[in-house]
Image (cartoon, helix red, strand yellow):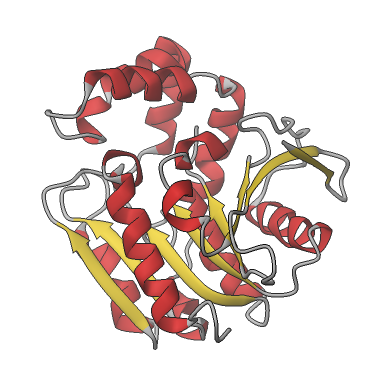
Amino acid sequence: MGCLRASDGVILRYVVDDYTDPWRSPQTLFLLHAAMGSSRRFYKWVPILARDFRVVRPDMRGHGQSEVPGKDGLSLDRLVRDVIELAAHLGCDQFHLAGSSAGAMISMQIALDHPHRVKTLATFASPPGLKHSMIDAQQWIARIRAKGLRGFLEETLDERFPGATDPEFVRWFVDEASRTSEEMVCRFVPVMRNVDQNGRLGEIACPMLCVVPDSDPHIKLEQYEVIRQRVPACEFVIYHGYQHNITDVVPERCAAELKRFLLRHCPVDAC
């Protein structure tokens, strides 16, 4: 696992998966995970994507093996800067960007603030910020403090996964997510809850793939659809019958969707 000290001193960890032909110079694809996640949540995506792209999977600050930042070290701008600094560390001027949930909101902000760096953008299960969602951040925090993170996750499984989801996977998911610091989650949720990118969506200039579930209990489909309406070059795909965690429940489908989109807009031999 690679290591980068961010400009504010926080240690960030990341994984690079590259199984491209060694005589080629591969394009780089960043995969940004969701809240309470880590680079490990994309493990099923790697075999599908890493043969054609250099895949970079960061652990967001305060998640996975990256350090928890101090009280002033968590904001949307700082999370954006972490990815830009990691790209510079890896010698990558331009890159493809894909994110899940909170990672997708960070991805959208990168495309807005650093448009010259992003070749394509893909978002999964993310509206343009949570400002207009039905998520009650303070209620979530109260439940986490009362039940613990594991208890909160176990109580909300039906909001995340269909009933037929493999119970062994669900157990692994809860174990992995529960490793995140409860205090970090209680700081992170309000940051994301205040994000509102609706007014700037028209500025996203690169090709965009937006994949959304239609049975998300906290985000109405019309809140997702504003992306299709306002982003000039947006391919909008609905996964019917799924709750929020599509990137975990159908990871191979999501990864194949992303690969198809990438190769359509930027063929490996031509970009």
Q: Residue at x 44, y 73 (%)?
A: 262
* Whether residue 268 is situated above or below residue 73 in the rendered picture: below
Residue 13 percent across, percent down from the top left: 72, 38
Please indicate, yes or no, whether residue 118 appears anywhere in the rendered image: yes
* Whether residue 15 is situated above or below residue 177 in the rendered picture: below
Please indicate, yes or no, whether residue 132 appears anywhere in the rendered image: no
Residue 244 percent across, percent down from the top left: 28, 44
Quick one: quadrant of the C terminus? Answer: bottom right
- Would you identify the image quadrant in which residue 73 lies? top right
Q: Residue at x 51, y 45 (%)?
A: 33
- Would you identify the image quadrant in which residue 202 lies? bottom left
Quick one: quadrant of the N terminus? Answer: top right
* Whether residue 259 is situated above or below residue 163 in the rendered picture: below
Q: 203 or 51: nearer the eye? A: 51
* Whether residue 196 is situated above or below residue 233 in the rendered picture: above
Residue 113 percent across, percent down from the top left: 65, 74
Q: Residue at x 63, y 40 (%)?
A: 59
Q: Is residue 271 left or right of residue 230?
A: right
Q: 192 or 158: nearer the eye? A: 158
Q: Is residue 123 left or right of residue 241?
A: right
- Would you identify the image quadrant in which residue 212 lies? bottom left
